[in-house]
Amino acid sequence: MTQGDGLPDSVMVSGDALVASSGQDDSLDYSGDAASKNPVVTPQFGDFYDPRPQEDGARRIIAYLLIGLLWFVVGGMFVLLAFGSIKVIDIKEFAVVLGPIVTLVSAATGFYYGTKSTVPSNNA
């Protein structure tokens, strides 16, 4: 059976959207779901925790991002020089930005590679 506008009775027009009324309860009921195959183990006080894998990944990402930032600034200087937006004599103004970035990149990469070399290897 259809309404006068050609839509079935189970579909009502609400503003610009079509709303389906199926007569079923649309609430979310997860009481019948099976338990997870891999339950989450809650850490207990005194459990051993090794943060090195996460620290190594975070240090690697930070080092790569800082090296990318350095390449972006230096590349931007060369692009501006190539298109004539700045002159060679104006490059000294970039020292205000470039000096701290070079210091930060060298400190971060030195810390990353320095801590990486102190970790004992399993191949010894």
Image (spheres, rainbow, N blue to C red):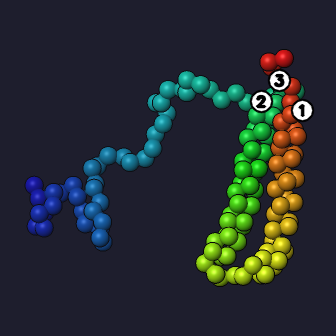
Q: CA distance from mark 2 to mark 3?
A: 27 Å
What kind of element bears circle 3? loop
Residue depicted at 85% across the width and 67% down the height: 99
Q: Crowdedness of circle 2 by 10 Å Cα count: few (<14), some, many (20+)?
A: few
Residue 22: x and y, percent? 27, 50
Per the image, the residue denoted by label 1 is 118
Which of labels 1 and 2 is toward the front?
A: 1
Per the image, the residue denoted by label 3 is 121
Q: Earlier in the sequence, mark 1 or mark 2?
A: 2
The three-letter code of the residue at mark 1 reads Thr
What kind of element bears circle 1? helix
Q: Is residue 102 above or below residue 60?
A: below
Residue 76: x and y, percent? 67, 70
Labelled pair 2, 3 in contact (Cβ < 8 Å): no
Residue depicted at 78% across the width and 39% down the height: 56
Q: Choose top left, top right, bottom left or bottom right for residue 8.
A: bottom left
11 vs 32, left or right, is left
- Outermost residue on the top side: it is 124
Q: Choose top left, top right, bottom left or bottom right for residue 12.
A: bottom left
Q: Is residue 59 above or below residue 84?
A: above
The three-letter code of the residue at mark 2 reads Pro
Viewer-side residue, 63 vs 32: 63
What kind of element bears circle 2? loop
Q: Choose top left, top right, bottom left or bottom right for residue 44.
A: top right
Labelled pair 1, 2 in contact (Cβ < 8 Å): no
Per the image, the residue denoted by label 2 is 43
The three-letter code of the residue at mark 3 reads Ser
Residue depicted at 70% across the width and 82% down the height: 86
Viewer-side residue, 2 vs 42: 42
